C-alpha cells in the first residue's frame, strides 16, 4: 500500500488490568469513519507488526449518532465514532495516525467497550419518565409550541456518556450524578402536569446532585448533540433553591398557623 493512501489506527485495547496499545495500517477510503475502519480491522486483524491478532471489540448500534453506543476517545476526546471521519482528522492534525481508546469514567469490559449502566441507573434515580394524569378524551395536558421546542431539544440526549467523560467532577472520589441526568430532570419537569417534579428536585438537592457541578463547562463542549447542558444545570440550580425556600417558608407559616 502506498503511504499516502493509508493511515494508522492506534488502539488502546485489552481487558481490565491488561491494556496495551496496538496499531493497524489501513487503506484510506473517501468518507470513511472510525466505525468503518474498525470493520476493516475485523475483516483483516493484522497489526503493523504483521501479527494476526484478535479482532478489536467495540460497540455500535444505529450508526447515525442517535443511540450513543459507539462513544469512545478519538485522539483523546470523547465523541461518537460513527461520525468521526478519518480524512477530517488527517487534514486537521496533519498526522496519519489516529488514536482510539475506551472511555475512562466507566468500567472497562474489553477493548473499546465500557459498561455505561450507571448512566441509565441515574435516569432511574431522577425518575426519568412522565407521570401525568391522562384523560381518554383530552389526552392529557396541552403542550405549547414553545414547550415542544424545548422538550425536543432536551430529548436528543443519547445517554452516551461523553459529558460524564469530560466532566472533572465525575470521578472515583465522588458520586456526582452528572450533567446528563440533571439535564433530564429539566426535560421531564418541563412536561405540563408532571407529577414527580418535586421528587426529582429533592434528588438533585442531595450531596451528589446539583452541588456537585464544578462549572468546568467541559460537558457542553463535547456533547454530540450540542445540548444546553450548562444552561440546564443553571436553571435546575435555581429551581432547587426556589423549591428549598418554598419548603422553608411553608414550614414556618405552617407552624404559625398551628399556634
Image (cartoon, grey):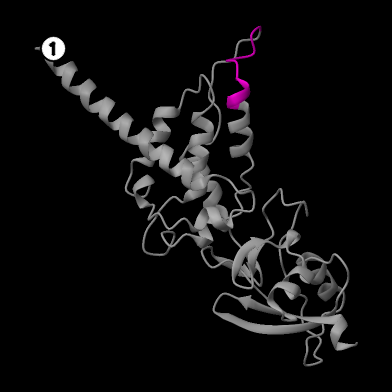
Report if residue 110 lies within the magenta region: no
- Quarter the C terminus occupies: top left
Report if residue 141 lies within the magenta region: yes
Magenta stretch, residue numbers: 137-147
**Left or right placement of residue 147 versus residue 201 in this view:** right
Q: How many labels does the image show?
A: 1
Q: In this view, does 98 lie above or below 58?
A: below
Would you say the magenta stretch is mainly helix, strand or loop?
A: loop
**Left or right placement of residue 249 versus residue 20 in this view:** left
Residue lying furthest top: 137
Residue 196: give x, y in percent of width and height: 45, 27
Residue lying furthest left: 259
Residue 250: give x, y in percent of width and height: 23, 21
At mark 1, the secondary structure is helix
54, 21: nearer the viewer: 21
Residue 68: give x, y in percent of width and height: 67, 53
Q: Residue at x 36, y 64 (%)?
A: 173
**Left or right placement of residue 186 versus residue 223 in this view:** left
**Left or right placement of residue 146 versus residue 98 in this view:** left
Residue 41: give x, y in percent of width and height: 82, 75
- Quarter the N terminus occupies: bottom right
> Which image quadrant is residue 13 in?
bottom right
Q: Residue at x 54, y 65 (%)?
A: 107
Q: Residue at x 61, y 75 (%)?
A: 15
> Which image quadrant is residue 16 in?
bottom right
Residue 166 in view in this figure: yes
Disc 1 designates what residue? 258
Residue 127 in view in this figure: no
Circle 1 packing at 10 Å, graded few (<14), some (14-19), many (20+), is few
246, 221: nearer the viewer: 221
Q: In this view, does 201 lie above or below 158?
A: above
160, 127: nearer the viewer: 160
Amino acid at each position: 500500500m502506498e503511504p499516502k493512501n493509508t493511515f494508522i489506527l492506534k488502539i488502546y485495547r485489552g481487558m481490565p488490568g491488561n491494556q496495551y496499545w496496538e496499531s493497524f495500517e489501513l487503506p484510506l477510503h473517501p468518507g470513511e469513519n472510525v466505525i468503518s475502519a474498525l470493520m476493516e480491522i475485523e475483516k483483516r486483524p493484522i497489526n503493523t507488526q504483521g501479527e494476526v491478532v484478535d479482532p478489536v471489540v467495540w460497540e455500535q448500534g444505529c450508526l447515525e449518532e442517535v443511540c450513543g453506543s459507539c462513544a469512545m476517545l478519538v485522539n483523546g476526546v470523547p465523541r461518537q465514532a460513527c461520525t468521526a471521519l478519518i480524512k477530517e482528522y488527517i487534514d486537521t492534525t496533519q498526522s496519519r495516525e489516529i488514536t482510539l481508546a475506551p472511555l475512562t469514567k466507566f468500567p472497562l469490559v474489553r477493548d473499546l467497550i465500557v459498561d455505561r449502566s450507571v448512566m441509565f441507573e441515574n435516569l432511574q434515580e431522577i425518575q426519568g419518565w412522565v407521570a401525568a394524569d391522562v384523560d381518554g378524551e383530552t389526552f392529557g395536558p396541552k403542550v405549547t409550541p414553545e414547550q415542544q421546542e424545548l422538550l425536543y431539544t432536551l430529548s436528543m440526549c443519547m445517554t452516551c456518556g461523553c459529558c460524564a467523560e469530560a466532566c472533572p467532577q465525575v470521578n472515583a472520589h465522588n458520586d456526582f450524578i452528572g450533567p446528563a441526568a440533571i439535564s433530564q430532570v429539566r426535560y421531564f419537569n418541563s412536561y405540563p402536569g408532571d407529577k414527580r417534579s418535586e421528587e426529582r428536585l429533592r434528588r438533585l438537592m442531595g450531596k451528589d446532585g446539583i452541588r456537585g457541578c464544578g462549572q468546568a463547562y467541559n460537558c457542553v463542549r463535547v456533547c454530540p448533540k450540542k445540548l444546553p447542558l450548562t444552561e440546564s444545570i443553571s436553571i435546575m440550580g435555581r429551581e432547587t433553591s426556589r423549591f428549598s425556600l418554598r419548603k422553608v417558608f411553608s414550614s414556618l407559616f405552617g407552624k404559625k398557623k398551628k399556634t
